[in-house]
Image (cartoon, grey):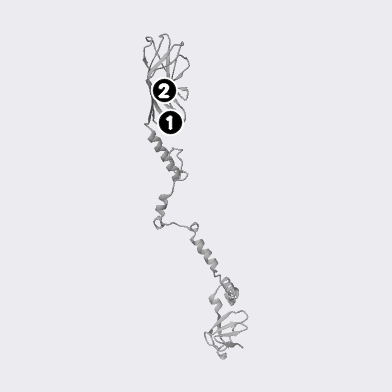
Amino acid sequence: MATRQIPLWTKASDPGINDDITFGMSISDHLKNTVSNEIFVCEDNTNGAAVWSSLTDALAPSGDMLGANNLSDVASATTSRSNLSVESTTQLNARDTANRARANHTGTQLAATISNFASTVRAVVLTGISFASSATITAADSVLSALGKLQAQVTINNAKGTTTEASSSGTTTTTSATPSVISGMTITPGAGDYLVAFSGYGSVDNNNETGKVGLYVNGVLHTGSDRVTDSHTVDENKSFPINAKVTVTAGQAIDVRFDVTGGDTFTMDDRILTVTKVG
């Protein structure tokens, strides 16, 4: 026999068809099984045909939520939260921190909605930029690499047309058959392509001997640049014009050299060497 305990009936077993109106039970009354802690609600209190439904089943159709999760254990808040899968304050804070971490974000966001985005991008310094390469920019280049190549190209283009000149009006002589640099006629322009122009006057003191003038790059005669004296009157000045396009690397010199056969004297007078960068 069940006993009534306001507002709940209690019994050491589940309610049955005889837990009905004859014992004072009304529709919507609740009954707790004190063994399983399961709670039931009365849906029909007809004498000998009472109908009771599990309230636990109604709340948790997947199983005995009260029994499985120990909801009756209210002595420990920690245990209750664990049984109900309710996060603790520490767990909530950790999840909030993870949610705020930008590395965990997915999707897209308009740049206009990010505070200081444009000004921050504009203020980034170009640490690590290199101007060593002037190669064509490709789709594989980073912004930093592309800017470095652009600046290198600009620097090269700005240098084009730059002219370096060496000139002398004093005489200089040689009696050697080995080419030697004409005094003042050397320029070290830096790596690149250059148009070279030389103009000078000279004479040999014996019309049976031959004087020669040539353009040299890094100590090597530039092909086709040598000029020689032809038949002439002794000590008659001759012009030795030379024009060429040459390529030099960093540190290499461009110079003009002369020599003479027979041990005679080759005298150079007014002369000028002009180097113009073209690439």
Please report the residue visible at 41 percent of the width from the left and 54 percent of the height from the top: 117
Tell me the quadrant of the picture where the N terminus can be found: bottom right
Give amino acid for label 1: Gly
Residue 266 visible within the image = yes
Q: Is residue 118 above or below residue 25?
A: above
What's the mark number on residue 267? none
Q: Nearer the viewer, residue 181 or 132?
A: 181
Q: Which residue is mark 2?
A: 185
Please report the residue visible at 53 percent of the width from the left and 68 percent of the height from the top: 89
Tell me the quadrant of the picture where the C terminus can be found: top left
**In the rendering, at what x and y percent does residue 244 appear?**
40, 24
Give amino acid for label 2: Met
**In the rendering, at what x and y percent does residue 223 appear?**
44, 21
Q: Nearer the viewer, residue 132 or 236?
A: 236
Q: SS for tag 2?
A: strand
Crowding at label 2, few (<14), some or many (≥20) Cα neighbours within 10 Å? many
Q: Quadrant of residue 210?
A: top left
Residue 273 visible within the image = no
What's the mark number on residue 192? 1
Disc 2 and disc 1: Cα gap in Å?
19 Å
Q: Nearer the viewer, mark 2 or mark 1?
A: 2
Q: Nearer the viewer, residue 88 or 181?
A: 181
**In the rendering, at what x and y percent does residue 246 appear?**
42, 26
